[in-house]
Every structure is written in C-alpha cells, then in structure tokens.
Image (cartoon, rainbow, N blue to C red):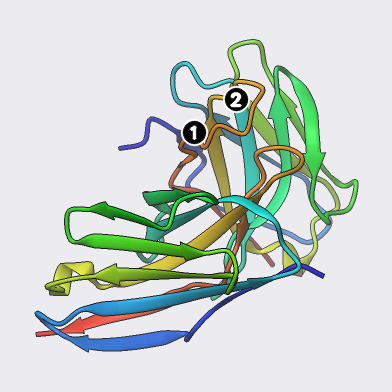
Amino acid sequence: SQKIEQNSEALNIQEGKTATLTCNYTNYSPAYLQWYRQDPGRGPVFLLLIRENEKEKRKERLKVTFDTTLKQSLFHITASQPADSATYLCALRSNFGNEKLTFGTGTRLTIIP
Amino acid sequence: ETGVTQSPTHLIKTRGQQVTLRCSSQSGHNTVSWYQQALGQGPQFIFQYYREEENGRGNFPPRFSGLQFPNYSSELNVNALELDDSALYLCASSSRTGEISGNTIYFGEGSWLTVV
C-alpha cells in the first residue's frame, strides 16, 4: 500500500540554523510533491511545489529537493526564525486519477531563540 | 488569505446525528476536495467534486456524501455521526484544466467537528 513518512514527529532547531525535514514515500508514482505549513487550529498553507522532473526548487529561505530514485524529498529552511515554528506537511499527487493529495503525518518544527 | 471559506468553524454534535459543512471555493476554481484531519495526523482525502460531479473518493463510508453547486461551492454531509468522526474537516479548491498541471491547491481554515 502507499505510504508517506516524514522523518520525525518533532524537530527542535536553534534560531539561525538550517532546519531540514524529510519526506519518504513507497508504492507511489508522484507527478509532483508539495510542502505545506500548518499552524495549530488552522488549515494548511501552500509553500512549494516540485514536479517529478525537477531536482530542486527555491523560494526565499525555503528549498525543496526531490529524488524520485530515492523516493525522497528534503525541505530546508535556512536562517531559521522562531516564526518558522509550525507543523510542516508533505503531500504527493499521483500520475493517475484526480487532484487528490496524499499527506504525510507532518513534522512539528520548533525554532528555539 | 486563500479565498476558501468554510462554515461553521466549530460545532458539537451528538452521536447518531447528521451534520452539513459548507465551503466556498476561491474565485475561478472549479474543483473542490474535502479532507478529514484527526488530531496529530495528516489530512485524509474524503472525495472531490469537479463540475458538480464526484470525481474520486477516498476510503470513507457512504454516510459521507457531498454536493457541488453551479457556483462551485460545496457541502459535505455526514450521517449517523460516530465518535471517531471528531476531526478538522478541510475544504480545498483548485482550478482543474483536464491535465495534471500542478495548479496550487488552496485550503480553507476548516470546520472543527466534535461528536459527543
């Protein structure tokens, strides 16, 4: 069955350092992968999308890599700030079917001042 | 601000009752999906509506049903509520062009349902 795993439930990073979150998947053929941020009690907010034929995407302090051979995506936040503290979700969409997203369980990131 | 609005934001229902949740999609978006997010979990796909027809369904029983209206707004109905239905229900809208285009999918803030 399809499975998406995010490396850890919680991650604590010192302010100013780079936070790296991992998303691994099995039994899946994704067309693209998205990363979302979710604050407590709020809906997910779209951050970045990377397609299966792309290796890397950047947006300001965010960087996403996508390795379809390793079946893995890495999400980096450089120069992390306390305001970056949130849960980060990765979501995959298949090459087949509709616009359904399959989500991981998320990583709760805390940036320590 | 994603332009996707959901109502109500919070509600409490009793086991066995029925509930209707509503969603207004972002202007110009023709596709609405519903997700259920239990505490500490990622969102789970319930179903999707495209041009007023169901276009895919996740692993949810038939007591979860929906509608999409000509203006692309949508409703999620849940009958015979169970305690395990307590969750955040998220609506997501996007503009489907008939291809896997990678168009951004925008989520609303969700409706918190508690079943007691």
Q: Position of residue A105 (x, y in %)?
A: 56, 73
Q: Residue at x 52, y 49 (%)?
A: A53
Dividing the picture into quadrants, the one containing residue A18 is: bottom left
Q: Which residue carries the number 2 mark?
A: B96
Image location (x, y in percent) of residue B35: 63, 50
For residue B30, what is the image quadrant?
top right
Residue at coordinates 49% horizontally, 39% vertically from top-left? B105
Above/below status of B5 relative to B38: above
For the point 55% across and 58% down, which residue is it? A91
SS for callout 1: loop
Amino acid identity at mark 2? Arg
**Cβ atoms under marks 1 and 2 closer than 8 Å:** yes
On screen, residue B62 versus residue B96, left or right, reads right
In the rendered image, the residue lying farthest to the right is B62
Give amino acid for label 1. Answer: Asn
Q: Quadrant of the N terminus of chain B?
A: top left
Question: Which residue is the site of mark 1?
Answer: B103
What residue is at 54 percent from the left and 76 percent from the top? Answer: B40
Look at the picture and state if A89 lies above or below A51: below
Q: Which sits in the foreground, B107 or A49?
A: A49
